[in-house]
Image (cartoon, helix red, strand yellow):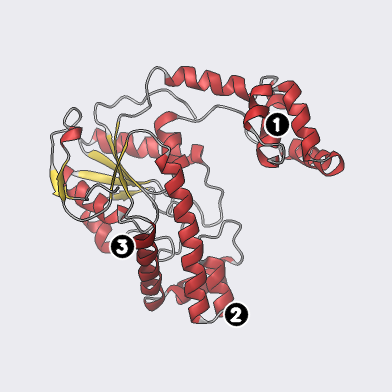
C-alpha cells in the first residue's frame, strides 16, 4: 500500500466508533448537509450478502445518499486492508472529481489506518515458509523462535511477547523474505509519514459508553430477529455453505436453526459476542489520534473543521466523558 498522498484539497469526514453507536445515522445526516457521498469503512459490509447481519444501508438510505464499497468482495473472499484501501482510493477520487465531498463511515480501524496512513510495504505471507516456522514452533517451542528473533531483530523481539506466535512468525517471515528486519520496514514507513498523511481528515467518534451500547446492541439484535435474520442466514447458508469469514452472529443463528440454542440463548450469545467486539473497537479507536469523541443527543456546530470546510451545524452529539 503506497503512502503517497492522493491529490485532493478536500478532507475526508470520518465517522468511527464501536458497532451500534449510531455511526450510520450520523453519516447520513452529515452527508446530506455537506452534499457528500458515503464510503463504507467496514470489514463486514464490504462482503456480499447478509444485509441485516452486517447492518448494510437500506434501499431507502442508499436512495438518500449514494454509498460506496458495500458488497464489493465475494461473501467468503479474503478482504485485506490493502485491497480495501485501493478500492477506497478509487471511490474517493471519483467522488471528488464530481465536486462532492466524502464521508467515510465504519468501525474497522485497520481499514482507516491503511487508507489514511498507508501500511508498511512488507511482502505478503509465504504459506510454505509459515508451514516451516510452525513445524519448528511445534518441535522447539515458541520461545525458541522468539529467541531467534531476539538475535535477528532485537527491537521487534522487545515489543513482542515470547508466547505471541502470530507476531513472532510475521517478524521472522519478513526477515527471511527480505533480508531486512521488521523494525527497518516500520522505520522507513514512519519516515514516509513524516511528509504528512495520505488524506486530510476531520475525525468524529461516537461512543455512548459500555452500558448504553449494550442496550443498543440488544435492541438492534431483537429487531433483526423480528425482521427476518433467521431466514436471511438460512437462505445464505443454503447457497454458500460454511464460511471461512463468518460475520458476528452467523454461527449462533445456524446453531439456533439446528436446535442447539433456544431464542433466549441465541439473543444472549449474539449480544455477548457483539459487545466483546465493540470493546475491541473502542480500545483501537481510543488510541487513534485526532478523533473528537461524542455520545449522542444534541446539535453541535463543527467549527473545529472551519480550516478545512465551511462550518455546518447538524443534528449531532454531546461530548462523552
Query: Is 254 located above or below residue 57 in the figure?
Result: below
> Which residue occupies 40% across, 36% down?
288
Report helix, strand or loop for mark 3: loop
Query: Is 54 located above or below residue 35 in the figure?
Result: below
Q: CA distance from mark 2 to mark 1?
A: 41 Å
> Which residue occupies 83% across, 38% down?
136
Report helix, strand or loop for mark 2: loop
Q: Is residue 98 left or right of residue 56?
A: left
Query: Is 178 located above or below residue 228 in the figure?
Result: above
56 or 133: nearer the viewer = 133
211 or 228: nearer the viewer = 211
Asked if the residue at tag 1 contacts the one at tag 3, i.e. Cβ–Cβ closer than 8 Å, the answer is no
Q: CA distance from mark 2 to mark 3?
A: 29 Å
Q: Is residue 26 left or right of residue 90?
A: left
Q: Residues within 10 Å of mark 3 (few under 14, many from 20)?
A: few
x and y, in percent, of residue 216 in the image = 35, 65
The mark nearer the N terminus, 2 or 3, is 3
**Foreground label between 2 and 3:** 2
x and y, in percent, of residue 304 in the image = 19, 33
* Circle number at residue 58: 3
The picture quadrant where one finds residue 145 is: top right
x and y, in percent, of residue 64 in the image = 21, 56
Q: Is residue 237 left or right of residue 167?
A: left
Amino acid at each position: 500500500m503506497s503512502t503517497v498522498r492522493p491529490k485532493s484539497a478536500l478532507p475526508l469526514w470520518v465517522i468511527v466508533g464501536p458497532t451500534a453507536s449510531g455511526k450510520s445515522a450520523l453519516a447520513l445526516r452529515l452527508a446530506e448537509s455537506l452534499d457528500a457521498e458515503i464510503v463504507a469503512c467496514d470489514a463486514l459490509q464490504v462482503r456480499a450478502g447478509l444485509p441485516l447481519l452486517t447492518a448494510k444501508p437500506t434501499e431507502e438510505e442508499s436512495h438518500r445518499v449514494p454509498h460506496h464499497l458495500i458488497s464489493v468482495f465475494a461473501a467468503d473472499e479474503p478482504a485485506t486492508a490493502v485491497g480495501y484501501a485501493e478500492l477506497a482510493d478509487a471511490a474517493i477520487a471519483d467522488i471528488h472529481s464530481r465536486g462532492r465531498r466524502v464521508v467515510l463511515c465504519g468501525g474497522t480501524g485497520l481499514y482507516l489506518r491503511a487508507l489514511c496512513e498507508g501500511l508498511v510495504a512488507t511482502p505478503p505471507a509465504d504459506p510454505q515458509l509459515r508451514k516451516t516456522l510452525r513445524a519448528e514452533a511445534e518441535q522447539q517451542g515458541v520461545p525458541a523462535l522468539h529467541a531467534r528473533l531476539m538475535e535477528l531483530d532485537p527491537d521487534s523481539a522487545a515489543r513482542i511477547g515470547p508466547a505471541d506466535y502470530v507476531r513472532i512468525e510475521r517478524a521472522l517471515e519478513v526477515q527471511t523474505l527480505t533480508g531486512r528486519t521488521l523494525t527497518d520496514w516500520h522505520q522507513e514507513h514512519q519516515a514516509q509519514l513524516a511528509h504528512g498523511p495520505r488524506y486530510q481528515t476531520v475525525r468524529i467518534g461516537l461512543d455512548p459508553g459500555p452500558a448504553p451500547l449494550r442496550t443498543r446492541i440488544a435492541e438492534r439484535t431483537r429487531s433483526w430477529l423480528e425482521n427476518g435474520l433467521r431466514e436471511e442466514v438460512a437462505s445464505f447458508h443454503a447457497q454458500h455453505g460454511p464460511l471461512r469469514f463468518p460475520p458476528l452472529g452467523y454461527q449462533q443463528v445456524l446453531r439456533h436453526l439446528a436446535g442447539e440454542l433456544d431464542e433466549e440463548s441465541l439473543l444472549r450469545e449474539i449480544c455477548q459476542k457483539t459487545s466483546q467486539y465493540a470493546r475491541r473497537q473502542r480500545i483501537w479507536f481510543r488510541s487513534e489520534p485526532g478523533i473528537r469523541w461524542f455520545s449522542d443527543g444534541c446539535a453541535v456546530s463543527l467549527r473545529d473543521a472551519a480550516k478545512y470546510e465551511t462550518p455546518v451545524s447538524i443534528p449531532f452529539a454531546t461530548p462523552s466523558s
